[in-house]
Amino acid sequence: MRIVDNPFLVLGLSPDASRIEIEREAQKLLGMLELDFADARSYATPLGPQPRTAEAVRAAVAALRDPYQRLVAELWARHAPSQPIAGEAEPAPAGAPGLRAKLGWR
């Protein structure tokens, strides 16, 4: 499982979320995606924002219904950095110094 595909990140929930919270959030997100709400189109990951699709939401819920897959997802979600990793987030605007320049590398 890739960290960016972690079901808890896809749903925007804490690893402590109950089964009912997971189901409710999934239904809410599916409705928002159906109505093309901008807030539902992406989700935060340690590697920067990722696109959220209805298929990804359904896959996340299915994974969290399986006890083994939920345990693995919980472990990864608990140990993932909460902020994007430097240099892995969205590209810098034109003219902005790159990661190499920020670190003093040539």
Image (spheres, grey):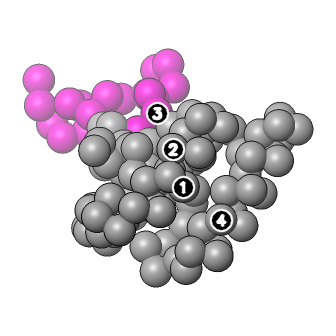
Q: Please rate how many residues cluster around mark 1, counting C-alpha atoms within 10 Å: few if below 14, some from 14 to 19, many from 20.
A: many
Q: Secondary structure at mark 4?
A: helix
Q: Position of residue 37 (x, y in %)?
A: 82, 41
Q: Which residue is mark 3?
A: 90
Between discs 2 and 4, the one toward the N terminus: 4
Q: Is residue 90 magenta?
A: yes
Q: Which residue is mark 2?
A: 59
Is residue 60 depicted above or below 99 in this figure?
below
What residue appears at the point 83 percent right and 37 percent down from the top-left corner?
A: 34
For label 3, count other residues whose C-alpha is less than 10 Å away and answer few (under 14), some (14-19) or many (20+): few
Position of residue 101 measured from the top left corner of the image (x, y, whole percent): 23, 31
Which residue is the site of mark 4? 23
Q: Are marks 3 and 2 in contact (CB under 8 Å)?
A: no
Figure check: 105 above or below 80: above
Q: Residue 66: where, in percent of width, then height?
A: 39, 61
Quadrant position of the C terminus in the picture: top left
Kindly identify which residue carries mark 1: 61
- Which residue is at 88% across, 38% downward? 35
Q: Secondary structure at mark 2?
A: helix
Q: Nearer the viewer, mark 1 or mark 3?
A: 1
| Nearest-to-viewer mark from 3 and 2 | 2
Amino acid type, label 4: Glu
Q: Contact (CB < 8 A) between labels 4 and 1? A: yes
- Tell me, yes or no, whether the two marked residues, 3 and 4, touch with CB atoms within 8 Å: no
Three-letter amino acid code at the position of disc 2: Ala
User: Which contiguous range is marked in magenta?
Assistant: 89-106
> For the point 47% across and 63% down, which residue is it?
65
Residue at the image point whose x is 74% and y is 46% from the top: 30
